[in-house]
Amino acid sequence: MITLLHCEGANVRECIKKLTDLAQRKFPPRGKAINSKIKVTMGAFLTISIMATFDLAEPYKPGIIVEYAVSGNKERAIEELQEKLNAKITPDMEIADLEIETYTTPVTRRTYAVAVVLYNRPIRSGLEEMKLQNRRKVLAKLLELVNFNPKALNISELARMFGVSRDTIYNDIQQILKNQEG
C-alpha cells in the first residue's frame, strides 16, 4: 500500500497539526513502513511531504512524530529539537525514516528546525498488553513506596524479575512518572 501525505502553510504549528491528523487518517491501522521518502522545505511557507509504502501483513502500527524548535542560532534550535524528539521516541519504536530541515529568517535571524520521524511500533497481543499493564501497576506501587524516586530502585533486578530489558523498565518508569506529573 502506498500513502502520500502533504501539507503546506505559513504557520508551522498548523502545518504540523494538519500533517499529524492526515497520518492518523491515512496510515493503515496495521502494517509496517518498508520504504519512504520525507521532504521538508522551508522559506515563506513550510512544506512537508511524505511518501511511504507499507507491508500490511506485518504486525506493526506505523506513525509519525513531527516537531519543531525556534532559537536565535542553528545549533541551539537543533539541540532543542533533539530534546523534543527524544522525549517522544520510545524504546519499542523502530525508526523507518527521519528528515530534518533548518531555516533562518532573513530579517529576525531566528532559526527554525523541523523534524519528521516515521516509525513502526510492534502491535502487542492481548497477553503482552496485560503483562505490560500489570508490570506498570507493580512499578507504580514500588515508586509510590520510595516517594517516586527511581534511583531507589534496582533496575537490573526489576528487569530480571519481569523478564524484560533494563530499557523497558526505564521506559515504564518514565511513563509512570510522566502520568504522575500530568
Image: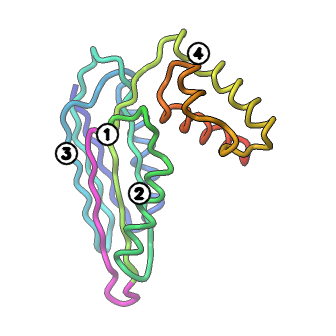
Q: Is residue 169 above or below residue 85?
A: above
Q: Is residue 41 left or right of residue 84?
A: left
Magenta run includes residue 17:
no
Magenta run includes residue 106:
yes
User: Which is more N-terminal, label 2 or label 4?
Assistant: 2
Q: For numbered disc 1, what is the local secondary structure?
A: strand
Q: For numbered disc 4, what is the local secondary structure?
A: helix
User: Depth-wise, is mark 4 or mark 2 nearer the camera?
Assistant: 4
Say which mark, if any, is on residue 37: 3
Overall secondary structure of the magenta section: strand
User: Which is more N-terminal, label 2 or label 1?
Assistant: 2
Classed neighbour count for the residue bearing mark 4: other residues with Cα under 10 Å, few (<14), some (14–19), many (≥20): few
Provide the residue designation for mark 1. Answer: 95
* The quadrant where residue 110 appears: bottom left
Q: Is residue 119 left or right of residue 89?
A: left
Q: Is residue 14 above or below residue 5?
A: below
Q: For numbered disc 2, what is the local secondary structure?
A: helix
Provide the residue designation for mark 2. Answer: 15
> Which three-letter amino acid code belongs to the residue tagged 3?
Lys
Over which residues does the magenta segment extend? 96-109
